[in-house]
Image: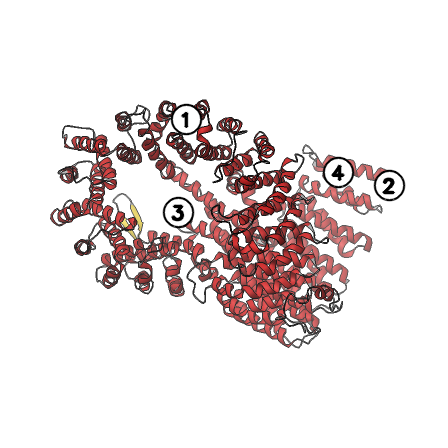
Amino acid sequence: MTGKDKDYRYMATSDLLNELNKDSFRAEPDIEAKLTNSVLQQLNDAAGDVSGLAVKCLVPLVKKVHEERILEMVNKLCDKLLNGKDPNRDIASIALKTIIAEVPTSLAEKIPVSLSPQLINGVISAEKSAEIKCESLDILCDVLQKFGSLIAKDHEEMLGALLTQLGSHQASVRKKSIACIASLAPSLSDDLLAKGTFEVVKLLKNKSAKPDIIRTNIQMIGALSRSVGYRFGPHLSETVPVLISYCTTASENDEELREYCLQALESFLLRCPRDISVHTGDIMRLSLVYLSYDPNFTDTMDEDTDDEEHDEDEDDQSADEYTDDEDASWKVRRASAKCLSAIIVSRPEMLSCLYLEACPKMIERFREREENVKMDVFNAFIELLRQTGNVTKGQTDTDDPRWLLKQEVPKIVKSLNRQLREKSIKTKVGAFSVLKELVVVLPDCLADHIGSLVPGIEKALIDKSSTSNLKIEALVFTKLVMASHSPSVFHPYIQALSAPILSAVGDRYYKVTAEALRVCGELVRVLRPDFETRSLDFRPYIGPIYNAILTRLANQDQDQEVKESAIACMSLVISTFGDSLQRELPACLPILVDRMGNEITRLTAVKAFSVIASSPLKINLVSVLEQVISELTAFLRKANRALRQATLGTLNSLVVSYGDQIGSSAYEAIIAELSALISDMDLHMTALALELCCTLMSDRKSNQNVGLTIRYKVLPQALILIRSSLLQGQALQALQRFFAALVQTANTSFETLLDSLLSSTKPSPQSGGPTKQALHSIAQCVAVLCLAAGDQKCASTVEMLMGILKDDNNGSSAKQHLALLCLGEIGRRKDLSGHTHIENIVIESFQSPFEEIKSAASYALGNIAVGNLSKYLPFILNQIDNQQKKQYLLLHSLKEVIARQSTAGKNELRDLYVEKILALLFNHCESEEEGVRNVVAECLGKIALIEPNKLIPALKERTASPAAFTRATMVIAIKYSIVERPEKIDEILYPEIANFLLLIKDSDRHVRRAAVLALSTAAHNKPSLIKGLLPELLPLLYDQTVVKQELIRTVDLGPFKHVVDDGLELRKAGFECVDTLLDSCLDQVNPSTFIVPYLISGLSDHYDVKMPCHLILSKLADKCPAAVLAVLDSLVEPIDKTITHKPKQDAVKQEVDRNEDMIRSALRAIASISRIGGSDCSMKFKNLMSKITGTASLAELFNSVRSE
């Protein structure tokens, strides 16, 4: 390494690098010193490639030697940097940066402590050159970023030294000092940060300073706010007015000053969203003024001139537009656009105001002459549209953002049409991006403007200068527009659109082709929207479309995306125009069958046959049907779940349309495969398989053996499934239809089926008795079976079930339980008044010692009453009056009656009944039992849906009751009356709902919780009811999320004391309500005022509160990233405690599982935050991420959560 020959030195250094990189390399203490010295020596080598290798040697070396050696190297290099000759200084600087970047944090205690004072001396020393100062500042910046928190004792001295450099004569020193202070700031204590910020603000206020220094001070303010985020908030009231004043009073040619002011204001908006609130109006107005700041150019073109008149002239005109290389006003306009974008992103609650004040100005600026600025204006407008899409549809008030946007659509389209005629490709791409976002937010807003947009689309697709990117944007927009508007809108322009789209199908770039094929799919739908009426002669277009797609379909050597799009598009063409393509089908269908045999395209081909089979044109598939059915049957055995699902759907469609052409052996093969798919492991698949069984049985063309095969192959699986506690929803409904279809098949007797259903309740040695859910499933299937078998069979079954209940000696509670549920399910569907005393027999079961039988009896009684209200409802009301002990059960029966009435859409409750029911319910709303109060509230809520005019005033009157339980019951009743579907109660409740929700400030916690739950339901189901009240309700809601000491009590249990937190349920409900509001009313919520302090306290609260808080944090990271970034440092600590929390040694399994769930939920929130651009600016968050990735158990959990 010390040889004279450069090549030898190079080879030796290279060998050393290879050795150092080996995991097995370990240096002895005496060799360490020699090793480090020789590497340092090589750094000074005159040959650049040798010194370059020596720098590479430092990377593994610092991980293999002791801290003292690294310290020694650092000090020598630092000395070389500050006092060495010019050639050595550069390499010393690079070497120091390498060591700082690579040294492990565990070894880093002494290095920054030793290095920082030397670098600071280099910075403040008067005799050092500007170059040395810049290098020192550069390295100090790296040290502070990585080890800032380890050198707290030097912070004050450093801050003082760096602040003095802001007045340096050299611009480069000032610039590097800004970066250094910004790197130091996050690790400063609050006192020092306040002191430093005070100094910087003081410098900023000094208006007599030189212009260069003023610019530096403004940049410093912006960099400081970016690095410390919300901690800068308290200084905004002093800073913002100064910046606005600088901006407005700067000399005409001082564009840089204005740009820096606007950049600093943008930083405030994004990093201090909470404290900037009072200034956002001023900043928005300032940004709007400077968005069109162009002192050197006067735009004489009137916006309102007719678009079409100067089409060609404008192309030439835009090429000769005014340009001036020295004109920097575009920087001011760009900074203004970004500032506006920051307001839009961080303040969803200002949307209406933005539409009224900013939107017209932004549309006007689409004609910006500087392309980069134009892109920023487009991006800001896209952000405005996205924020509008995030907020709910709400009511169409005149201040609803969607309504306001709709008013601006004509202007937007007119302005963008002009941009689509520009020569610049980038401009056209930007214009299509805006249009695309517009269609996503307001799907049907362009119906009147399609004609004016067609030339722009045509030109983008046909023009020789168009790039692939432009074509893709134009095609995606065309597809979205066609999918979201009525087909008739496009009929006048089909001729103009079809040629460019079909030429794009032949494009050489696969992404353009795939997108064009998707547009073709929409074009087919537009050409023939329905099969009854013909509003357009589509025949001339069939041939060209078919041929263009066939070329792509038949071609094997092309991208998978193109193959899949061609298959999907061809299936649409065949299903829509099959009657005009009779001759072409024999050539085309075999290709689709061939694609089913290819693993890559088979899923798309399966879906394609489903589309063709569902066509009302009954396409002739004789030539390929047998092969298709056999391929599909084989697919039912494949492991690919999506393929099996698609196959079941396609088989269903094929059997419906072509059942008479399918042989019995094919049917039997299908049924054999279906039996393996029916299990509770995959209920969606089960539902599809059962649907297919029903289709096979109901198809009259299928032969008699189908019923038998299903009975022997599928029925045993169905009887196992019915015992599952997981069975619900679609699968349960499909199972009911399966039994109804089976009893109507000639070969299966009703008695056999009924017996097999009833006997499935017998306890099995493996799983014990049936679960409650299983009994409900069996009862529903029995009821459907009885009704399908006819009145006589149904009556005999009811008698048999009544017999089970009469038989007192029958010890089997499961049998009685099932009998009651069956009677209820049959009674709900059919009038059972022909069976005498059935109500008395059911009510006898109220005496049972078993809770589940009492509950089943009340369910049965209520449902039997639904079948014949006039007979059984008076009986129930009479019993409630007379039977004090059975009141709770009878109220449940009444609830069943009312709930079924309110959802049935027909009201059979006569006024007389309603009066009686209300009197009875109002009597019970003060009950001590929470269960009774909840049932009463649900009944009142459901009656309110039927009789809102009567109920709302009655409920409102009782919200003033002195009894807290009554007030709470009234609010819960309102909660039950707010359902997702539109109801006549809505317009009556709208003006009155405030009376109920404002009970959120009631003195009783039960009433407050009821109001929070009602608000949550309203936000979820009908956000329009509460939007106007949110400014008043939100502070009250946030208050419910705070831990209140007066609600915490200690219960003395003798040997130990137990702490009870009565406010826990209320806090949990409060956070869950905020979570719902973020989904439905984001434009009304200011996230910054909620995060600090409410969310932060929730993240340190009880397990039940932390879980919804983690969800909220994930949502905010996704929807309002700026608000989360602004306070990221303070969010880290509570999350860190959660993920490092260990349960006690003697914790039971349930506690261990809960703790793991909580850690997972916290990691989900961390994963969402890590996706925000700029989250790595927070030192604390960076350290947290390093901790997670460095801990094996956490890293594994984090990776599994991220891949969910």
**Residue at the image position 67 percent from the left and 61 percent from the top:** 421
Q: Secondary structure at mark 1?
A: helix
- Mark number displayed over residue 6: 2
Provide the residue designation for mark 1.
675
Instruction: Name which of mark 4 and mark 2 comes first in the sequence.
Output: 2
Nearest to viewer (mark 4 / mark 3): 3
- Mark number displayed over residue 1103: 3
What residue type is disc 3 on? Tyr
Instruction: Name which of mark 2 and mark 3 comes first in the sequence.
Output: 2
- In the rendered image of this protein, does residue 637 appear above or below residue 957? above
Instruction: Name which of mark 4 and mark 3 comes first in the sequence.
Output: 4
Instruction: Name which of mark 3 and mark 1 comes first in the sequence.
Output: 1
What residue type is disc 1 on? Ser
Provide the residue designation for mark 4.
17
> Which residue is situated farthest in the left direction here?
882
Alpha carbon distance from label 2 to label 3: 67 Å
Instruction: Name which of mark 2 and mark 1 comes first in the sequence.
Output: 2
Q: Is residue 196 visible?
A: no
